[in-house]
C-alpha cells in the first residue's frame, strides 16, 4: 500500500534551530545578542498568541525578544514613529509588525516604515522585490518555510507544475515567485479563478494559502502530488481537507506541526542573519 510522507514541520524547525544555535554562540563571543522587536496593535487573541509564540521561540534559542504592545486607538503616524525609533535602535536587529493591524490603520504604510535591513518578516516592497529577483535579503517567512520543508525532504521543484491557491502579498504571491525562482512552472489561483478544481488536478505541487478551513478537496489532488498547507484556521484546521488529500498525495504538511513551526524558525533565522549583517557593517 502507498505510504504518504508526512512533512514534519517540528523536525524541520528543529534542524534550522540547531544550525542557528552555533551562530548565536559565535555572535555572543563578539558581544552581540540578536534581538527581535515584535509590535502588536490591539488585543486580537489569535495575534496575541502568535506574538507570544514568536517571543517564546526567541527566548528558548537565546535571542532577545522586545515586545511592544500598543493600544488599538493608536494612529498610523504614531505607529510609524515607534517603528522609526526601532529602526534607529542599534540593539534591535529585526522588527515584526503583527498582521493584521486594526482596520483604521494604514498597514502598508506601517510595513514600509520598517528599515529594509530589519525587515526580517519580508513585508516591505523592497524585501518583496529582492525575494522576487532571487537576491539576498529576508523573504516572507511562511513561503520561505515551505521552501525549507521542500529542501529538507529533498523534494524537487524544478520542472514541476506548482499550483498556488491564494495571492496575498505575504503568502501566495511570494510563494509563487519563490517556486518560479526554483524553476517550477507556476499557476497562481485566486477567488476569481474559474474551474479551480481542474487546475489543481494538474499540479505536482499544491500550495494552499486561502484562509478557508478544509477548502482543498481530496478529489482535486493528482495522485502523487506534494501538498503544502499554509492555512491556519481556528481550531488548528488547515486550508486542505487533510484526511482526503493524504490518500492522494505523495507528501503532505499536517496542520498543526507543518508549515507553522518552520515559519517561526525562519523568523529566528532571519533575525540572526540581520544581527550578523549588522556586525559586519560596524566591524
Ligand atoms: P488572505 O490575505 O485572506 O488571502 C487569501 C487568498 O485566498 C486571496 O488571494 C484570495 O483571493 C484567495 N481566495 C479566497 N477565496 C478563494 C476561493 N474560493 N478560491 C480561490 N482562492 C480564494 O490570507 P493569507 O494571509 O494569505 O493567509 C492564508 C492562510 O494562511 C490563512 O489560513 C492564514 O491563517 C494562513 N497563514 C499561516 C501562516 C503560518 O505561519 N502558517 C502565516 C500567515 C498566514 P483574492 O486575492 O481574489 O481575494
Image (tube, rainbow, N blue to C red):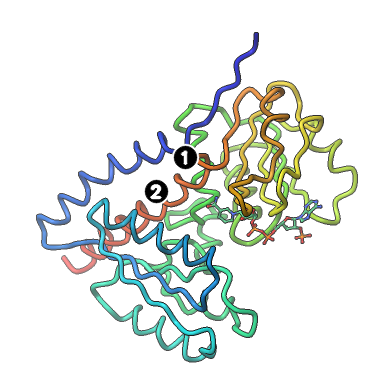
Q: Could you tell me which residue is drawn at 23 percent across and 45 percent down? A: 21
Residue 86 in the image: x percent, y percent?
A: 34, 79
Q: Residue 148 carries which label?
A: 1
Horizontal and vertical percent for residue 38?
A: 39, 69
Residue at numbered disc 2: 265
The mark closer to the camera, 1 or 2, is 2
Q: Residues within 10 Å of mark 2 (few under 14, many from 20)?
A: many
Q: Earlier in the sequence, mark 1 or mark 2?
A: 1
The quadrant of the rendering that contains the C terminus is bottom left
**Would you say the residues marked 1 and 2 are in contact, meaning their CB atoms lie under 8 Å apart?**
yes
Name the mark on residue 192: none
- Quadrant of ligand 1: it is bottom right
Q: Does the residue labelled 1 lie within 8 Å of ligand 1?
A: no
Q: Position of residue 280 (x, y in %)?
A: 22, 61
**Quadrant position of residue 10:** top left
Question: Residue 238 versus residue 276: which sits nearer the camera?
Answer: 238
Q: Residues within 10 Å of mark 1 (few under 14, many from 20)?
A: many
Position of residue 33 in the picture relative to residue 237 (left or right):
left
Measure the alpha-carbon separation of dots 1 and 2: 10 Å
Q: What element carries label 2?
A: helix
Direction front: furthest residue:
235
Horizontal side of residue 102 vs 97, given as left or right: right
Q: Quadrant of the N terminus?
A: top right
Amino acid at each position: 500500500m502507498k505510504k504518504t510522507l508526512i512533512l514534519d514541520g517540528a523536525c524541520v524547525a528543529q534542524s534550522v534551530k540547531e544550525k542557528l544555535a552555533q551562530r548565536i554562540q559565535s555572535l555572543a563571543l563578539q558581544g552581540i545578542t540578536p534581538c527581535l522587536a515584535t509590535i502588536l496593535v490591539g488585543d486580537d487573541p489569535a495575534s496575541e498568541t502568535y506574538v507570544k509564540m514568536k517571543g517564546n521561540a526567541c527566548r528558548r534559542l537565546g535571542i532577545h525578544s522586545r515586545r511592544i504592545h500598543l493600544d488599538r486607538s493608536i494612529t498610523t503616524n504614531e505607529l510609524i514613529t515607534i517603528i522609526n525609533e526601532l529602526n534607529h535602535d542599534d540593539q534591535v536587529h529585526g522588527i515584526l509588525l503583527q498582521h493584521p493591524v486594526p482596520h483604521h490603520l494604514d498597514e502598508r504604510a506601517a510595513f514600509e516604515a520598517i528599515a529594509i535591513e530589519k525587515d526580517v518578516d519580508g513585508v516591505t516592497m523592497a524585501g518583496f522585490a529582492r525575494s522576487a529577483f532571487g537576491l539576498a535579503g529576508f523573504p516572507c517567512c511562511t513561503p520561505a518555510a515551505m521552501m525549507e520543508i521542500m529542501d529538507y525532504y529533498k523534494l524537487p521543484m524544478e520542472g514541476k507544475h506548482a499550483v498556488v491557491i491564494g495571492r496575498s502579498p505575504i503568502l501566495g504571491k511570494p510563494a509563487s515567485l519563490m517556486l518560479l525562482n526554483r524553476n517550477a512552472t507556476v499557476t497562481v489561483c485566486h477567488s476569481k479563478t474559474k474551474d479551480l478544481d481542474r487546475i489543481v488536478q494538474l499540479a505536482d505541487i499544491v500550495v494552499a494559502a486561502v484562509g478557508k478551513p478544509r477548502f482543498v478537496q481530496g478529489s482535486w489532488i493528482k495522485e502523487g502530488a506534494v501538498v503544502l498547507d499554509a492555512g491556519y484556521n481556528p481550531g488548528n484546521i488547515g486550508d486542505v481537507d487533510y484526511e482526503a488529500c493524504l490518500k492522494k498525495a505523495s507528501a503532505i504538511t499536517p496542520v498543526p506541526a507543518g508549515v507553522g513551526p518552520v515559519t517561526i524558525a525562519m523568523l529566528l533565522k532571519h533575525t540572526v542573519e540581520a544581527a550578523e549583517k549588522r556586525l559586519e557593517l560596524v566591524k
